[in-house]
Structure formats: C-alpha cells, structure tokens
Image (spheres, helix red, strand yellow):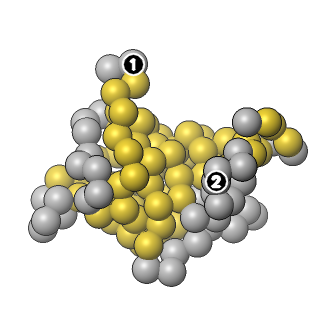
Amino acid sequence: MTTSGGGIEDKRRRAPRVSRGAPVRLSWNHGFEKYGMGQCLNISRTGLGVLVAEPIPVRGHVCLRSETLGLSGSASVRYCQNHKAKYLVGLDFSGGLEWTAP
C-alpha cells in the first residue's frame, strides 16, 4: 500500500481511497430501525470506511447521508471490525451511487 497525492492506493482496490473526515448518518437492519452517526475515515468512488459506535451486520445494507461529502444513498457492508472501543465498517456503494472529489 502506498500513499500518493493524499490518497491511499492498494492494487487490490477498484478505486483509490482518499482520507476524508466527515460525519455520516446511517440507518440499517430490515426496517432501517437502527440508526446512528459515524465518522468517515476514507472514501473512494465506490465506497467508504466509517467509524461507528455499534456493530453493523456484514452483508447487510445501510442507508447513508452526508452533506459534507455530498452523498445520499445505500451501501452494502463488506466488513465490521472492532477498533478501539468502536467499529470500523467498510461500505460498498450500491444502486449506482458514486462519489467524486470536489
């Protein structure tokens, strides 16, 4: 993994990631009855890494919104890892959602 131009590059990734701190609103579970705020750690064209207070089921779906990032849509949960009393969650955008850097 190398860093180039403020982004993180990894040959296994479909798109380069960019470090970006921004609040993200999330809702999940069958009726989206669970919800909370997360902190975006990094983002790419096709997904983002977010730090949250409680675990989100892997292979589940979330609705997300961030005015700071200009995002609103859905994503699938790729992984959820315990990280310093919080959870690091990897999300893949779905439904045609893509992020472009401003």
Q: Residues within 10 Å of mark 2 (few under 14, many from 20)?
A: few
Name the residue at the right extreme: 5
Disc assigned to residue 38: none
29 left or right of 63?
A: left
In percent of width and height, residue 24 lies at 44, 51
Name the residue at the bottom extreme: 96
Q: Are marks 2 and 1 in contact (CB under 8 Å)?
A: no
Disc assigned to residue 13: 2
Can you tell which quarter of the image residue 98 is in?
Answer: bottom right
Can you tell which quarter of the image residue 10 is in?
Answer: top right
Question: Please, what secondary structure does the residue beneath circle 1 have?
Answer: loop
In percent of width and height, residue 70 lies at 58, 66
Query: Given the image, on which type of amino acid does mark 1 rest?
Result: Lys
The residue that disc 1 covers is 84
Q: How many marks?
A: 2
Comes first in the chain, label 2 or label 1: 2
- The residue located at (30%, 34%) in the rendering is 53
Taking the image as drawn, is residue 18 in sight?
no
Does 70 appear above or below 20? below
User: Which quarter of the image is occupied by the C terminus?
Assistant: bottom right
Query: Given the image, on which type of amino acid does mark 2 rest?
Result: Arg
Looking at this view, is 60 or 29 the one in front? 60
Q: Nearer the viewer, mark 2 or mark 1?
A: 2
- The residue located at (29%, 57%) in the rendering is 59
Question: Please, what secondary structure does the residue beneath circle 2 have?
Answer: loop
Label 2, label 1: how many angstroms apart (C-alpha)?
25 Å
- The residue located at (34%, 27%) in the rendering is 82
In percent of width and height, residue 28 lies at 23, 58
